[in-house]
Image (tube, grey):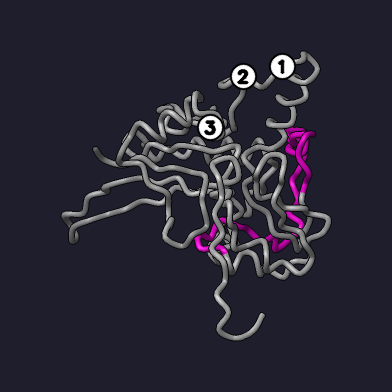
Amino acid sequence: MSIGMKIPEIKMSAEETGKWGMVIDQDICTGCQACVAACAMENNITFVGEEDSGYGRSMHWIRIERFWEGAYPEVKMTANQPMLCQQCGHATCEPVCPAFATVHSQAEQLNLQVYNRCVGTRYCGNNCPYQVRSFNWRDYQRPEPLPNQFNPDVTVRRMGVMEKCTFCIQRIHKAQDKAKSEGREVVDGEFTTACAQACPASAITFGRVDDPESLVSQLAKKHAHGVKHLEELGNLPNITYLKGG
């Protein structure tokens, strides 16, 4: 491409921006972190311990960000914001991976992480504006009988690889396989992610964003105060946050 040549604008239809998405209502999120615990159990995420956490090496795929206002001692928490992989349509993590370990699924329109390709460069983590990727610093050991809690549908990652939220893709595939065997489409609300299932306040809603009749689509369109985090970067995130209004 010659210098000065205008780069054409890329426009994506609703179907191309995402198939699965999420709506998170910050007004009713209590910050209890039930979603964090459920995600860890569902996806075989290691608890790294106090020492590594002190170095910023925690392995959670979803975290609760808290916002505060006021000066001490009159400090008030104004909002809780669950932060996880935004499953971007134009993900900045994908083009920088030299091993093609972070790829975009054309079938589910998700940002996937292929663990047996990852060589641990951490370029994807450095290029992610949401900082939702974790690096496996060690082969963490779990004393008996803790290995019995592993989810057999999810890979146990090794030292030296990046990992992140995949919208519980093992649940997506299980629901799709069941629907296919019964000769039908996946029904809205038939299944959900571990974080949404565990939320006691029902602040997290998951579903098909390419289906205008789905609950997640209705929530995203109904509320004028719905926003997408750092949408101005052009990443096309597939998680809508509801706040105020």
- Residue visible at 75% across and 36% down in the picture: 150
Q: What x and y, as percent, mark residue 48?
A: 63, 54
* 235 is within the stretch colored magenta: no
> Pointer 1: residues within 10 angstroms few (<14), some, or many (20+)?
few
Q: For this view, does 225 lie left or right of residue 143?
A: left
- Residue visible at 47% across and 31% down in the picture: 217
Q: Quadrant of the C terminus?
A: top left
- Residue visible at 26% across and 47% down in the picture: 78
Q: Are dots 2 and 1 in contact, CB under 8 Å?
A: yes
Dividing the picture into quadrants, the one containing residue 52 is bottom right
Nearest the camera: 91 or 84? 91
- Tag 1: amino acid: Arg
Which residue is the site of mark 3? 206
Look at the picture and state if 66 lies above or below 167.
below
Assign a secondary structure to mark 3: strand
Between tags 2 and 1, which lies in front?
A: 1
Dividing the picture into quadrants, the one containing residue 32 is top left
- Tag 2: amino acid: Val
Magenta span of residues: 128-156
Cα separation between marks 2 and 3? 12 Å
Q: What x and y, as percent, mark residue 143?
A: 75, 44
Which residue is the site of mark 2? 187
Cα separation between marks 2 and 1? 8 Å
Q: What x and y, as percent, mark residue 189?
A: 56, 21
Q: Are dots 1 and 3 in contact, CB under 8 Å?
A: no
Which residue is the site of mark 1? 184
- Tag 3: amino acid: Phe
